[in-house]
Amino acid sequence: MKPKTTLLAAVLFVVVQAAVSVQSFGQEKSIYWVVETNAVNKQYSIVRFYDQSNQLMHEVKLDNIYIDIRKPKYQRKLNQLLKNYQERTMITSQKHKSKKSI
């Protein structure tokens, strides 16, 4: 009886893992941020934005500012900065679309 229970648990685990991986596959972040700071010499922070293919989109160096990403207030500010950047890039890309002549 015990081998059947173990086999059933293993099959159930594989099915659940496959379902989770299929759901998470389509939910990739479009762009994300990375912060580079020096923990010893806290004289600057560099914030970089990357797209879904891990290409650098934008970089900002902040002198005399130390960003500790473990703190929620910094995470919220960076997420808001990322959201503002996305909105600005969408607006500028819409303005520069070529118009087709009839």
Image (tube, rainbow, N blue to C red):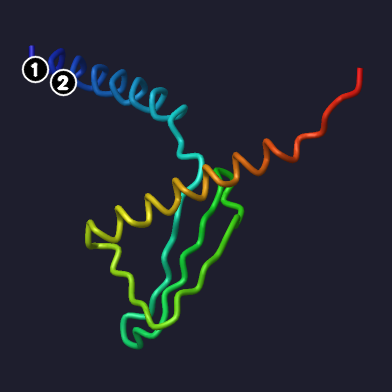
Quadrant position of residue 91 = top right
Quadrant position of residue 68 = bottom left
Q: Position of residue 79 (x, y in %)?
A: 37, 50
Relative vertical location of residue 96 with respect to residue 75 in this rendering, above or below: above
Q: Which part of the image, by quadrant, shows the C terminus?
A: top right
Q: Which residue lies furthest to the right in this view?
A: 102
Between residues 3 and 59, which one lies in front from this camera angle? Answer: 59
The residue shown at (46%, 50%) is: 32
Q: Total label count?
A: 2
Q: Return the mark for residue 91.
A: none
| Secondary structure of the residue carrying numbered label 2 | helix
Q: Position of residue 54 (x, y in %)?
A: 57, 51
What is the crowding at mark 1: few (fewer than 14 residues within 10 Å), some, or many (at least 20)? few
The residue shown at (31%, 26%) is: 17
Q: Which residue lies furthest to the bottom in this view?
A: 41
Q: Position of residue 21 (x, y in %)?
A: 38, 28
Relative vertical location of residue 22 with respect to residue 96 in this rendering, above or below: above
The residue that label 2 is drawn on is 6
- The answer to whether residue 30 is left or right of residue 93 is left
The residue that label 1 is drawn on is 2
- The answer to whether residue 1 is left or right of residue 15 is left
The residue shown at (67%, 36%) is: 94
Q: Which part of the image, by quadrant, shows the N terminus?
A: top left
Q: Check whether the beta carbons of the residues at disc 1 and disc 2 lie within 8 A of each other.
A: yes
Find the distance from the CA under tag 1 to the CA under tag 2.
6 Å
Three-letter code for the amino acid on which mark 1 is drawn: Lys
Between residues 72 and 11, which one lies in front from this camera angle? Answer: 72
Three-letter code for the amino acid on which mark 2 is drawn: Thr
Relative vertical location of residue 30 with respect to residue 43 in this rendering, above or below: above
The residue shown at (32%, 86%) is: 40
| Secondary structure of the residue carrying numbered label 1 | helix
Q: Where is residue 77 in the image (x, y as percent from the top left)?
A: 33, 56
